[in-house]
Amino acid sequence: MSTPESVEQVHAAPNNYVPKVPVTIECSIEKTLSVIGGKWSFLVIRELFCSKKRFGELQRAINGVSPKALTDTLRHLEEQGVLERHAFATVPVTVEYTLTPKGGDLHQILKEMKLWAAKWT
């Protein structure tokens, strides 16, 4: 049996509760999309799953991407830690791009997207 004192404590708690009003509700999908970036990112990542690639190789492999769009995408993915840029002191400078472990973790997501497309499109 409860005592009157414990009953008062139970009823007092809801009166003292003040709900939090979140400023923003974080969404992990939004976070993922902000890291991955724009339209060409998945295609760049797809190409780098196989092996390291140079700029020209990426441009030839991704149909329709402009040099500016590819440059912007590569810079964004590098800033987000998805890929690494390796420059070699040659004339002209040789630059290769490789995925980081963070970028490699996207492999399963791309596989699932490919399966979805095969099933529904």
Image (cartoon, rainbow, N blue to C red):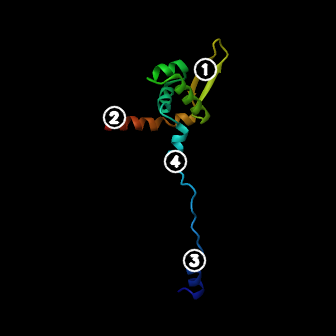
Residue 117 left/right relative to 3 = left
From this view, report whether residue 27 is shown above or below residue 79: below
Amino acid type, mark 1 = Val
Residue depicted at 53% across the width and 18% down the height:
56
Q: Position of residue 26 (x, y in %)?
A: 54, 52
- Counting other residues with Cα less than 10 Å from the Cα at mark 4, is it few (<14), some (14-19), or many (20 or more)? few
Residue furthest to the top? 91
Q: Is there a contact, CB below 8 Å, between mark 3 and mark 4? A: no
In terms of sequence position, does the residue under pointer 3 or pointer 4 come before the other?
A: 3
Quick one: SS at disc 2?
Answer: helix
Task: Identify which residue, 53 or 105, lies in the foreground.
Answer: 53
Amino acid type, mark 3 = Asn
In terms of sequence position, does the residue under pointer 1 or pointer 2 come before the other?
A: 1
Q: Which residue is mark 4?
A: 28
Per the rendering, the mark at residue 118 is 2
Residue depicted at 50% across the width and 28% down the height:
44
Q: Position of residue 17 (x, y in %)?
A: 58, 72
Amino acid type, mark 4 = Ser
